[in-house]
Amino acid sequence: MILYNKLYTTLHRKRIREIALYSNYPDKIQECVLKKIIKANINTQFCRQYKLSTKTTYKEFASSVPLFEYEQFHSFIKQLFKGEKKLITNDKVIYFAKSSGTTCDKSKYIPLTRNFLKTCHYKGGRDILLFYLLNKPGSKIFEGKTLSLGGKFSEETTISTYKVGDLSAHLIHNLPLWAKLFSTPPKKIALHPEWESKVKLMSNYIKKKNVTAIMGAPSWVIILLKYLLNSTNKNCVAELWPNLELFVHGGMSIKPYINSFNEIIGKPINFMEVFNASEGFFAIQNDLNSNDMLLMLDYNIFYEFIPFEKTTNTINNAISITDIELNKTYSLVITTSSGLWRYILGDTIEFTSLTPPKIIIKGRTKLFINAFGEEVIIENVEKAINEACNKTNSIVKEYTVAPLFSKSKSAGCHQWIFEFERKPPNMEYFMKIIDETLKKLNSDYETKRYKNITLDFPEFVVVKNNTFYEWLKRNNKLGGQNKIPRLCNDRNFADEILKINNEL
């Protein structure tokens, strides 16, 4: 198998040189990417509307084309649904990736083309393997299979001419031959539409396979692995798959789940983070000894960055990669060859290096609590939970945080709703650690907590096992890329969870 590793890296030696070169000249490469995207789509309605030409500079592009959030861009999506051609891209849109993002009640439809799948998402898949082998030349990953946990296709009566579904479903459906040889389970099982039946089918099929790698969202992989262990009477995954060595994760933070994974797997493995979404594939952890990720510059995506001002939660004008600064939070904006133009992704990042450009994910622009002026972001919450879990030897399975208003001595407090894998022996102490950690991490929170005047000590509720899973099930959100809303500024989701908990 070492021969396979050498063969793979030899075949992609040119790619290794490309990445090194591109990473040293990010501004030049991104300038070329923008020109390429505009040139390829010059006769689309969008380019004509905003007077884009092959000579358009970035400055002209930024002044001509407005920034779009999904709500503003949705008018183009509706025209595509009606069969409009050459609207936002010259390439034929044949798929829509359906994503709920972080909202509970509205789906997003992201246009996909075959060319974009090839030059972005599948290119990312090849680069993941390349980076891993460069880090682990003695890997035995080719001796077994890679387990891919996919989503499903949707029954969309209003979009009959397009194939609609989770991005992972589209990727598995169109998987290149080179990837099929090392993937499990087969498409028929991987794309089974009903989640609970899929888990059973997958478990029966994969339990006898030699799985060396896993790819998927942490929350759904955890559920599959637990079912697998229960159905095989194994104590840990290592007993079933002794050659498992890699878990590639993305789409959500692994921090809340890392302790669960370590226990379930039962041996040390490599964790490799990627930054991907329905809208595109953006970054890969190219060094397993560092937590940041290399921003991929040649995936048919042009990047812009909006400085994210924490104090006011507002955004300023976008800038190109030429003007970015280290250790500053940016909201990510993308223009892609599949028809997204100056699209505000909703994710925030921070650059840890400029040459090469390396980033960490900070959170979501809309994923924060600011009910009392406290401006608590998801990164603060995850660090606080990790601190509390480490100090109390506990494991959080799922959680959400919402404001609780009308407290007698203050404006209100935060209500934390937990579902535990392993509950701490003293919940009051657990919450005290969270509260103190948030004060250290967030000056706004610390100010609002001063003498409990504006914000009281947080309350907590520990719900029954599988309460969050039941919410996903009732809302037809099992599997795929659906996520639990972690931070909310109203009580809608929290009250639904508490209601389900009372019914169980």
Image: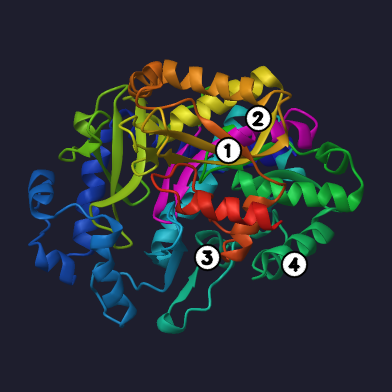
Which of disc 1 and disc 2 is earlier in sequence?
1
Residue at position x 67%, y 64% from top?
Answer: 195
Which of disc 3 and disc 2 is earlier in sequence?
2
> How many marks on residues?
4
Q: Amino acid at mark 1?
A: Thr
Q: Amino acid at mark 3?
A: His
Residues at marks 2 and 1 touching, judged by CB atoms closer than 8 Å: yes
Which of disc 1 and disc 4 is earlier in sequence?
1
Q: Is residue 287 visible to us here?
A: no
In this picture, is 226 found above or below 106?
above
The residue that mark 2 highlights is: 137
Choose mark 2 or mark 3, whichever is in front. 3
Magenta highlight range: 256-285
- Graded by Cα atoms within 10 Å as few (under 14), some (14 to 19) or many (20 or more), the crowding at tag 2 reads some
Q: Which mark is residue 170?
A: 3
Residue at position x 65%, y 29% from top?
Answer: 136
Residue lying at the far front in this picture: please name it: 408
The residue that mark 1 highlights is: 9
Alpha-carbon span between mark 4 and mark 2: 38 Å
- Graded by Cα atoms within 10 Å as few (under 14), some (14 to 19) or many (20 or more), the crowding at tag 3 reads many
The local secondary structure at tag 1 comes to helix
Q: Amino acid at mark 2?
A: Pro
The residue that mark 4 highlights is: 197
Q: Amino acid at mark 4?
A: Ser
Q: Tell whether 324 sits left or right of 194.
A: left
